Image: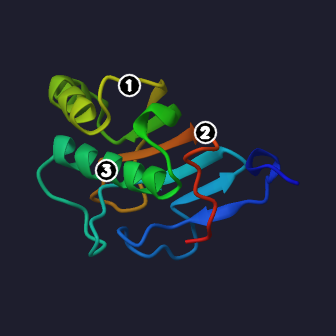
Amino acid sequence: MTSKTSDLTPIAVNPADLAAPSGYSHGTLSGNTLYLGGQTALDADMQIVEGGIVEQFRQAFSNVLTTLRAAGGVPEDLVSITIYLTDIPDYQAHGREIGQVWRELAGPVYPAMAGIGTTGLWQTEAMVEILGVAVIPDERLVRSAT
């Protein structure tokens, strides 16, 4: 009998709640590890949300969490987050608000994190892109192609 953790065959995780991907997956599950693809502030209509860095962070992180939940994960399963930013000073200026959004969506869980400045993202109006890694326990793991 093969346990879930020994099955390392990659499975795409593409929740129906997110815009259908083209040429990428929202996440890839291998064993108990979920690699969360970079998420910008795209809404279901493939439009970047308006309202500045805080609202873009909210949408991008919500997209990450939607993918995480589709594989049976919860915020506590996040082990690493990387945040790409087109304007680091703007992010820093709104740090308290962004921290409040984090706690609202994920609670007081803080995995290893990195913030990286970049000159641009795939969508020109995107200000933030978030990707991550999660390790999901067997008892909650959902291993189905979506």
Task: Say whether disc 3 or disc 2 marks the residue closer to the N-terminus.
Answer: 3
Q: Does dot 2 land on a helix, a strand or a loop? A: loop
The kind of residue on which mark 1 rests is: Val
Quadrant where the C terminus sits is bottom right
Which numbered mark, 3 or 2, is in the foreground of this view? 2
Q: Judge by depth and name the residue closer to the eye, 77 or 64.
A: 77
User: Gap in Å between the C-alphas at discs 2 and 1?
Assistant: 17 Å
Q: Residues within 10 Å of mark 1 (few under 14, many from 20)?
A: few
> Which residue does the numbered mark 3 point to in the structure image?
62
Secondary structure of residue under mark 1: loop
Note whether residue 117 is visible: no
The residue carrying mark 1 is 109
**Number of numbered discs on residues:** 3
Residue pointed to by mark 2? 137
Instruction: Report the mark closest to the observer, 2 or 1.
Output: 2
* Residue closer to the observer: 53 or 66: 66
Locate residue 107 relative to residue 66 in the image: left or right: left
Where's residue 133, x and y in %? Answer: 57, 40
Residue 121's quadrant in the figure?
bottom left
- In the depicted view, which residue is nearer to us: 88 or 56? 56
Q: Quadrant of residue 23?
A: bottom right
